[in-house]
Amino acid sequence: MTVLRKLLAQRSAALALTAVALLVLTALAAPLITWLAGSSPTAFHGEAVDPALGGLPRGTAGGISAAHWLGVEPVNGRDVLARVVYGARVSLLIAVLATALSVTLGTALGLLAGFLGGWTDTVIGRLMDLLLSFPSLIFMIALISAAPGADRRLLLVVVLGFFGWPYVGRIVRGQAMVLARGEFVAAARVLGASRRTLLLREVLPNLTGPVLVVATMSIPACIATEAGLSFLGVGVQPPTPSWGQMIATAVPWYAADPAYFLIPGALLFVTVLAFNVLGDAVRDTLDPRSRPR
Amino acid sequence: MRPRRAACALTATLGLLSAAACGGPDGGGAAADATPAPGGTLHVLSSIDLEHLDPARAYVTSTQDVGRLLYRTLTTFAPAPGQAGGQIVPDLATDTGRPADGARTWTFTLKDGVKFEDGRPVTSKDVKYGVERTFAAELPEGPPYARLWLAGGETYKGPYKDPAGLASIETPDERTIVFRLNRPVADFGSAVSLPMFAPVPQDKDTGVGYDNRPFSSGPYRIDAFEPKKQLTLVRNPAWDRTTDTVRKGLPDKVVIDLNLDPAVVDQRLIAGQGEDADAVALEPIGPASVGRVVNDPRLKKRLVTGESINTRFLSINTRHRPLDDVRVRQAIAYALDKDALRTTRGGPIAGDLATTLLPPTLSGAAATPATAAATPPGGAPEDPYPSKDGKGDPDKAKALLAEAGHASGLELTLDTPATAGGKAQGEAVQASLARAGITVKINEISSSAFYSTVGSPARQHDLVIDGWTPDWPGASTYLPILFDGRLITPEGNNNRAQYDSPEVDARLDEIAAVGDPAAAQSAYGELAQRIMRDAPVVPFLWDRAAVLVGPNVAGAYGHTAFVGRLDLVSLGLRK
């Protein structure tokens, strides 16, 4: 827990950590929040919008009122608060699971490549190069469109995780190569430790730092990519709310109803920023060389 | 329901075909007052792609509107706003056709001096070949009238497989064409206004590839075409305006930008700066811009409203389980929130809520005292599935579902075009059916492939957001095309409900044999109510179109044949 204490000592990191914690809490408590606010993410509220003006929300700032705390969506009158908190669930769930997948894959394969070397390294290394040089966004769009019937959330996790692992793998491989030549590994080897023991007991624990850093950095990247894919129309399927989709629908309304654009946009911005600041802080804390003296 | 102005009675199509438009209250607007002058470059900003330029395949109103710049047909719609636009006038032919043999034989004489873009004269053989092409299996999307009505049409396989041609189209000389039909068709002179009756020179036919480069007989020819991006039209030097009473051909050049973001189109036209001053929108204004435009008197002047007789509806695939149970379909008809659907299209500005299949002007409600008694004067027939303000009646729907044994709910898939509007409408259907316990999954289909996908019974799902404009005034190109069970085809199918009722089929044949148009119209009105009881579709909107034009554009009016879209052939720039 020294890492956490060190993090809390830095003001920016403490703020970021608070923001992240709040966000996770909001996502977990989404049903409670909508129950308190008396709203639902999918119910239409025709009376909250003015059909004569093309479905513009009635009232100020996108229809903010006692009934709809963050206003309503234009045209259909769905509650924005309910949609952003449920959207947080989708964004976070996909980002965390995709990161877990890419970190697991990346660590395992990177470790093997770095520690074993030889042809294992060649095969895994080339595979990582191949994936890194791929126009992954285009490939993701194609892949997701090609499987229309599949569960989009699961598909997004798999696709994001699959294209994310080489970034983790490269860092792990580099670290593992250095560690494999370390004196403590040589000592363990001389004492007759098996390859498996060397990998799991000697090398892997020393990789916790870099892996943790990559993971914290990967979560905001996944959130942003998921929002981007949803924006492009290949994200989660309607009516499941997602921030990217909300931003996409809000684009034509930016002049008529700016609040509808600002709310999910600001949330996405704060979330990605908080995770990035946190990631930076974790790296600074774990890696003595990058710490400002 | 507010009655539609009687003067605006006309026809419309396929969310695709022809429609009746009226210059609405602001319709003529500033744009129509000024006189357009020749010259300049007209820009058309389109948020959609052109589905098919090939005249054999053009069965979508937006493409037909553009096609009228490129090719001429035997007859066409008058270039006029309102009811007058539904009138059929001669185009390639010298008149609207001469029937003989009890309307079984139709003769047309081509005008002298009409030329293709390379200067060769348009002959009756080119028209014959153009019609024969539409029989080819490779070019499936067009209207069915040729195979339906021409003698021997049911066995003819098109000129690629059968170069001998179709014997029932005779060309006694270069300027005379005779169509021999298998039944009396009183409005065949209207049918030949369709692009499928445009001339195609055989040596220029490139089969499926003709779609990208149709050979011009109109005022413009294709200079460059990048599908999904841009179509550039330049003057056709061989076009002689003295032979053409319909097309003004004023601008020197017409540039149509395709697949633009709808919001970008609205913003550019609202700003109206630079080239955009000379621009018009192809599609109606988006909901997000309605508030801004109607609140600004100067912008409101540039909003041209055209009425149409297009009916939008939700098609229910009657062959899929459990939709083969009429109670389930009726439950959907009760549950659907028509008002929410209209709001996704821009609210009341987008039209009136539909209560039945035929718009009041087509239903023949006023035609006979018998039906007039059953319906409010001039109003639409009663909705068999009424709900307050068209917002749906979930309780009724639930009761019907429970009766059909689906009390625990059911799951359906809805096909929508992958556009912002398509998704918004899909979500409105989803939310309103959810109130009755029906879970709807939305299947988004790329808009250029949308109609070919849902027109294939093998590939379509349970529900489709659909619509129809009769091909010319009257219900004869509406009910028989959409609800005749014998016309369900494996590709290019228009009966997307796959509705197949021998009783209705027989009645359609009876009405087709009725000679008196007024009697036929009222019979169609009654048949529409009969079909509604089976609920193969749920009508929700009778369209109006509000289209933005740039400040420097003149001659703009909404045309009934194109669902209230601007009549492109009359547009010009102010000088």
Image (tube, grey):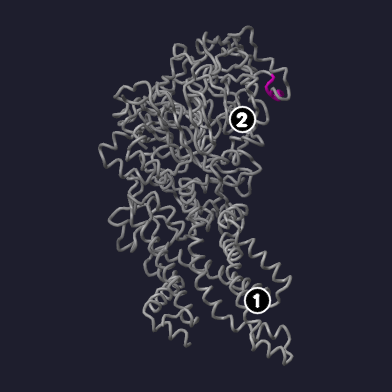
User: Tag 1, which chain?
Assistant: A
Give the x, y percent position of residue B32.
32, 26
* Location of residue B486 with respect to A228 vertically, above or below: above
* Location of residue A243 with respect to A19 vertically, above or below: above
Write down the quadrant of residue B162 in the picture: top right
User: Label 2 belongs to which residue?
Assistant: B505
Judging from the image, what secondary structure is the residue with disc 1 in?
helix
Residue furthest out toward the left:
B297
Q: What quarter of the picture does the C terminus of chain B occupy?
A: top left
Question: The disc labelled 2 sits on which kind of residue?
Answer: Asp
Give the x, y percent position of residue A68.
34, 61
Q: Is residue B548 magenta?
A: no
* Location of residue B80 with respect to B242 vertically, above or below: below
- Asked whether, in this view, residue A143 is left or right of residue A247, the answer is right
User: Label 1 belongs to which residue?
Assistant: A111
Question: The disc labelled 1 sits on which kind of residue?
Answer: Leu
Judging from the image, what secondary structure is the residue with disc 2 in?
helix
* Of labels 2 and 1, the one closer to you: 1
Counting every numbered tag in the picture gives 2
- The magenta stretch is B152-158
Q: In the image shown, does A108 or B136 lie closer to the viewer?
A: A108
State the residue at coordinates (42%, 68%).
A273
State the residue at coordinates (30%, 61%).
A65
Cα distance in 3D space between marks 2 and 1: 72 Å
Q: Is residue B542 visible?
A: no
State the residue at coordinates (46%, 45%).
B421
Q: Is residue B63 visible?
A: yes
Classed neighbour count for the residue bearing mark 1: other residues with Cα under 10 Å, few (<14), some (14–19), many (≥20): many
User: Tag 2, which chain?
Assistant: B
